[in-house]
Amino acid sequence: MEGPLDHPLNIAVPASYNDQQEGVNFRDHYGFVFYQRELEVPKVLQEQRLVLRFGAVTHGAQVYLNGHRVAQHQGGFLPFEVEITEVLRPGKNRLTVSVDNRVSQKTLPVGSDSGGNMLGGLLPEIPGIQLPPQNYPNFDFFNYAGITRPVKLYTTPRDYIEDVTLVSRVEGNRAVVSYRVDTMGQGEVRLLIRDEEGKEVAQAVGDKGEFVISPVHLWQPLAGYLYTARVEFGEDCYEQTFGVRTVEVRGIEFLINGKPFYFKGFGRHEDSPFHGRGIDEVLHVKDLSLLCWLGANSFRTSHYPHAEEMMELCDREGIVVIDETPAVGVHANFGAMATGTPQDTFSVLQVKEPHEEVIRDMIARDKNHPCVVLWSLANESDTTTFPEKSVAYYKPLYDLAKALDPEKRPVTIVGVQNEYQKDLTLPLMDVICLNRYYGWYLYGGNFDAAKQASKMELDYWSTLGKPVMLTEYGADTVAGLHLATPTMFTEEYQVEFYAAVHEVVDQYPGFVGEQLWNFADFATIQGIMRVDGNKKGIFTRDRRPKMAAHALRERWRKIPNFYYKSSKAVKKEKLDE
Ligand code: GCB
């Protein structure tokens, strides 16, 4: 790790490396890669505390400075940082990062390191032929890897602010905000709160306490409003934005600022040509612009926490976010890990510790974002093979999320299509989130059957008296493929598919949202289930609308953000322009 790399290639950071160079071995490389660059810090900064921060490295990282390991981190979608003040040399330093893209039965997301593929099953050996390494994702998105989010070197004084937490409650037309500032070293904490116009609205002194904003301007869906807390501590200073809004589940309703909210949107992947899963801030802006064009108001960060730059943008724009951990593929009877014999997912997989860790880290990173209204503990876990074992696994995680979130937001788990009557885990959650493919994987081509099956399921879930929503439903659709009689994979079929589902869900008062699958086409592993990736996007991968996007726009622009399911709907709220 001390010397320069042999035969290095030029790779841009931040981005996934997979699509930056040609060749199957490069794209599908499995195991470690090494990044290296020189680092020199100007003398003037060397009196400060120097911190190297990685927005995300997928999935495992070891960081070396001049050959000494200074940090290691497992988990590809959340930040980590290391102080390098003491190890940095004057002049040039060599920074090396090893990146490990392997996924296994001990990682999140989960992979199969013992064989199998997307369709399940081991490949028979062929003498003289090297089969690809047996490392398969147990999830349906390409296992992009690399240093995918920004790497920053920042400085603080020796006594510094470590963390800021702000939680507000609304009392009439004022907000009471309780705050906590964690610091290292000696000094007094001072806060100055400004509104969006830069006007000072409150002040506070001390490392914890309360301040009042009166009158308060609420953060609203599609009308984000942010206050800025300028925190001073000795010579250190940090500006933390926050919004004031309430979130609550009451009976069958999901309330934002006390009013029943209706989710309109989709699951979104961080995925684009060339960048792979690497951050693309132009795309962030573009995707939110398309979201607004559609008349949508929300998305889920399927299936991992998205870049913090995106979360900040959602705060500003008022986009409502379901924030999901990378716990995808926690299912030993499904996808790459299926063997045919029912397995106990929670003893086959050893992911409890990483699961607790990502919940902790995700909430630590995102707790101050007003855009986050619901935490998703996992996507499509095995909740029904051994229902009690699933409860024993997820109930403590639910409690952990509640304990860690200073705002105590609602918590959910996104449920897979299964024998739902057996499921004991989903009913424990605050919101019932369902991924359902009636009319695609089940009853494909038969909308009557699909509608009937959906009704039976919604009748069942309605008895719980909790809000229910779809977090996935969709149909693979090849852009440009048309037929007058809708047939699977055509654009016409995708339009009819959504119309059929909507006809059903509109009948249920406790149905609080529709997030379809997926916002845009995205890359996956190769296999006979996928034609150049997953094509369930309502936009193509380069963000061209399919027919369904126009049809959804028609629908969503008529559905108000609030009171859609209540009799007061149209009277209370003007329809979206
Ligand atoms: C699902 C998964 C999602 C897949 C989708 C599909 O249920 O949650 O990751 O991409 O189905 O298209 O099959």
Image (tube, rainbow, N blue to C red):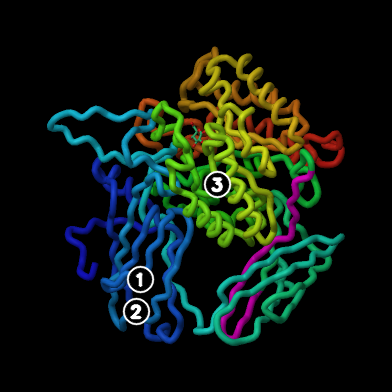
Q: Mark 3 or mark 2, which is nearer the start of the sequence?
A: 2
Task: Judge whether residue 294 can be spotted in this image.
Answer: no
Q: Are marks 1 and 3 in contact (CB under 8 Å)?
A: no
Q: Nearer the viewer, residue 199 or 365?
A: 365
Q: Mark 1 or mark 2, which is nearer the start of the sequence?
A: 1
Relative image position of residue 293 (x, y in whole percent):
62, 41
What whole-number distance in Å separates the C-alpha atoms at marks 1 and 3? 30 Å
Tell me the kind of residue under disc 3: Thr
Q: Residue at x 64, y 25 (%)?
A: 501
Q: Which residue is drawn at 64% across and 28% down?
A: 421
Tell me the kind of residue under disc 1: Val
What whole-number distance in Å separates the C-alpha atoms at marks 2 and 3? 37 Å
Q: Are marks 2 and 1 in contact (CB under 8 Å)?
A: yes
Residue, disc 3: 301
Question: At numbered mark 3, what does the secondary structure look like: helix, strand or loop?
Answer: loop
Q: Mark 3 or mark 1, which is nearer the start of the sequence?
A: 1
Residue, disc 2: 87
User: In the displayed structure, does residue 394 sit left or right of residue 26?
Assistant: right
Question: At numbered mark 2, what does the secondary structure look like: helix, strand or loop?
Answer: loop
Secondary structure character of the magenta stretch overall: strand
Segment tinted magenta in the rendering: 230-250
Residue, disc 1: 70
